[in-house]
């Protein structure tokens, strides 16, 4: 379950850096990394030492960005080459070791609250967005101009959502624009009511409205793959979005769209089995947890798929694995199996009995207890009057007196 719904602890140690990203042209550094805003952040705080955190694919630009910031601000810049967790998390521990007074985080961010009260500035980058193409894709996915729709995006495309909404508002009357839920500066006070925060975003909902009323249109990703696992931000949205509402995404470069399938977050708290969990429960040949892939498409479990695992034959030993009773907590063996072509086969088969292999004082004591599990024993318990029990703590009950 850990590898299914969250990242395992070993993932951070086994993650590979991958191929280096393309270097940003020198003429675009100020725009992509918002250097003017970063310079204002450093000067407002009068910081002398500032830590710069880049994801692995942007480390090629780190040296040039740090040199420009040092030249403009006069402060010392430190590049954090190895983060404590993922690149999306703010590494305040690394910044503290460098003696930094502030930290600038570049690239995608999960906006998790930092462990230490360190001033942090987030620079998501400004990915180019083809507004006309995205507007046409929005109109194709949402033909009803009165339907409530919220505009979402990956962090690098958030700068273009207001411009996209400007193109759509003459026709669409119920349009909601989200924004990244950036943390407030340290020591700042906000007298205005805080809008709804969810999925690392702020939603300026009108009074009496709720987010579950809105369809979603997401700007981001490549648009070339239908697998949302390639985009962790999109996966988080799909897991928490209302399943009865439509969810479509659009590539900001080409305007290509695809329909997504929101998965109800309430299923984590209800006894609902996914297809992969049902396959693991009914197919004894399915790999154990941690080795089996988590599949969400039914076609991946059918014959012909590379993930298909056929059922073992009836005479396989995999069917003879006993299970544990959830009522008594005892091992419950399966009935003996015989092939159907056996002339001695009948409707009733003898039930195999477990033999005691080794006895121990602890096992003998447990077997002698009167309570043997959650057995109802209806009508077998004698009726007795309710009596008051002992009071106090185990070291000194009230009726024992002082010693």
Image (cartoon, rainbow, N blue to C red):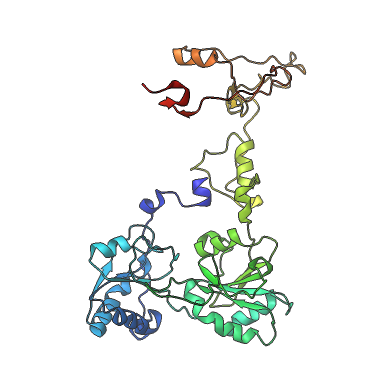
Residues 261 and 226: in front is 261
- At 60% from the left edge and 86% from the top edge, which residue is drawn? 166
Q: Residue 241: x and y, percent?
A: 62, 62
Which quadrant would residue 76 be assigned to in this image? bottom left
Q: Where residue 336 sits: x, y (%)?
A: 66, 19
Residue 338 in picture, x, y percent from top left: 68, 19
In this orientation, which residue lies closer to the viewer: 114 or 191?
Answer: 191
Q: Is residue 234 left or right of residue 398?
A: right
Look at the picture and state if 121 lies above or below 296.
below
Q: Is residue 83 visible?
A: yes
Residue 239 is drawn in which quadrant? bottom right
Q: Residue at x 61, y 45 (%)?
A: 276
Residue 57's image quarter? bottom left
Image quarter hosting the C terminus: top left
**At x 65% / y 78%, what residue is drawn?**
175
Q: On the rendered structure, is 102 left or right of 145? A: left
Residue 301 visible, this orientation:
no
Q: Residue at left 59%, top 60%?
A: 240
The residue lying toward the viewer, choosing from 9 and 206, is 206
Q: Vertical placement of 8 versus 96: above or below?
A: above
User: What is the tally of numbered marks visible in this picture?
Assistant: 0
Where residue 373 sits in the image (x, y, percent)?
Answer: 60, 23
């Amino acid at each position: 379950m850990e590898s299914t719904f969250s990242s395992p602890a070993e993932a951070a140690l086994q993650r590979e850096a991958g191929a280096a990203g393309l270097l940003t042209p020198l003429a675009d550094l100020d725009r992509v990394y918002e250097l003017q805003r970063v310079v204002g952040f450093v000067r407002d705080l009068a910081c002398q030492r500032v830590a710069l955190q880049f994801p692995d694919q942007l480390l090629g630009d780190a040296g040039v960005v740090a040199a420009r910031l040092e030249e403009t601000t006069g402060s010392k810049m430190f590049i954090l080459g190895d983060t404590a967790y993922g690149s999306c998390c703010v590494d305040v521990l690394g910044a503290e070791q460098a003696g930094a007074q502030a930290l600038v985080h570049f690239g995608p961010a999960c906006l998790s609250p930092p462990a230490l009260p360190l001033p942090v500035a987030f620079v998501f980058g400004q990915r180019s967005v083809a507004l006309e193409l995205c507007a046409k894709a929005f109109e194709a996915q949402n033909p009803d101009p009165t339907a409530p729709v919220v505009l979402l995006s990956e962090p690098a495309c958030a700068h273009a959502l207001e411009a996209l909404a400007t193109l759509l508002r003459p026709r669409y009357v119920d349009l909601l624009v989200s924004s990244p839920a950036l943390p407030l500066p340290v020591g700042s006070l906000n007298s205005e009511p805080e809008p709804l925060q969810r999925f690392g975003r702020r939603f300026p909902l009108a009074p009496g409205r709720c987010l579950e009323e809105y369809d979603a249109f997401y700007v981001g990703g490549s648009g070339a793959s239908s697998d949302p696992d390639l985009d962790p931000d999109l996966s988080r949205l799909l897991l928490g979005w209302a399943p009865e509402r439509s969810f479509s995404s659009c590539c900001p470069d080409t305007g290509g769209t695809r329909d997504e399938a929101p998965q109800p977050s309430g299923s984590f708290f209800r006894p609902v089995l996914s297809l992969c969990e049902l396959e693991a429960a009914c197919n004894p040949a399915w790999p154990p947890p941690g080795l089996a892939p988590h599949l969400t498409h039914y076609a991946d479990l059918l014959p012909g798929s590379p993930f298909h695992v056929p059922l073992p034959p009836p005479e396989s030993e995999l069917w003879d694995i006993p299970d544990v009773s959830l009522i008594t907590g005892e091992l419950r063996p399966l009935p003996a199996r015989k092939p159907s072509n056996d002339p001695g086969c009948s409707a009733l088969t003898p039930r195999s009995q477990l033999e005691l292999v080794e006895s121990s004082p602890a096992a003998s004591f447990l077997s002698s207890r009167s309570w043997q599990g959650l057995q109802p024993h209806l009508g077998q318990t004698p009726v007795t009057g309710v009596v008051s029990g002992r009071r106090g703590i185990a070291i000194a009950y009230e009726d024992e007196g002082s010693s």
